Image (cartoon, grey):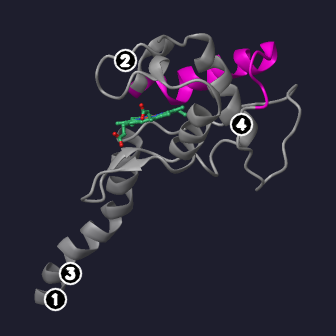
Amino acid sequence: MRSRLFLAPILACLAFAPLTTTALFAHGDVQPQPIDTTGLDPLKEGEWLPENPYVGNKRAIEIGASGYNQNCARCHGLEAISGGLAPDLRYLELGKAGDEWFLDRIRHGSKKPDGSTMMPGFEGVINQEAMWAIRAYLVTLHQE
Ligand code: HEC
C-alpha cells in the first residue's frame, strides 16, 4: 500500500509530461511555413548565390510577398513596415552588399550574446529560391 501511494504521483507525472510539452510547443512560437516556389528557375541545393537571381521577377515577387507574410511579418511587420519589434526591412541596402547581409540573416537568424534567439534561422525550413523570392519582394518596398 505504501509503495503504491508513493508511485502514484510519479506515474501521473510521466503520463502527463508528454501532453504538457506538446501543449507548450503548440502555444509557443508560430511554426515557420514552407513556401511553394514552383515557377521559379530552380537553384542548386547547397550552392549559395552571392546575389539575388530574381530581382524584378514578377513570379518571385508574388511568392516572396506570401512567404514574407507567413514567416516574417509577425516580427518585421506587414508590408515590411516595422512596428519596432525587429528592424524595418524596407531600409535594407540594395544590391550585392544588401543581398549578402540578407542571405546571412535569413539562413542563420540572430542570437543574443546569452544564446537566446532574436530571429530564427530559416535554412532547412525554406529553400534558397524562397529566400531570394522574399528578398525580391522586399526590394520592391525599398526606402532610402
Ligand atoms: C521572431 C521574430 C523574427 C522573425 C520571425 C524574423 N525575424 Fe528577422 N530579425 C528579427 C530581429 C529581432 C532582428 C534583429 C537581430 C539583431 O539585431 O541581431 C532581425 C534581423 C533581420 C535582418 C537584418 C536586418 C538589419 O537591418 O540588419 C534581416 C535581413 C531579417 N531579419 C530578415 C528576416 C526575414 C526575411 C524573415 C522571414 C523569413 C525574418 N527576418 C523573420 C526578428 C525576426
Residues under labels 2 and 3: Cα distance? 53 Å
Question: Residue lying farthest left?
Answer: 2
Nearer the camera: disc 3 or disc 4: 4
Ligand 1 within 8 angstroms of badge 1 C-beta: no
Which residue is found at the position 58% from the left and 36% from the top? Answer: 97
Left or right? Give the position of 117 relative to 59. left
Q: Under tag 2, what secondary structure?
A: loop
Q: Under tag 4, what secondary structure?
A: loop
Instruction: Write down the residue under mark 3.
Output: 7
Q: Mark 2 touching mark 1, by CB under 8 A?
A: no
Ligand 1 within 8 angstroms of badge 4 C-beta: no
Q: Mark 1 touching mark 3, by CB under 8 A?
A: yes
Residues under labels 1 and 3: Cα distance? 6 Å
Which residue is found at the position 56% from the left and 11% from the top? Answer: 141
The reply to whether the magenta stretch includes residue 70 is yes
The reply to whether the magenta stretch includes residue 137 is no
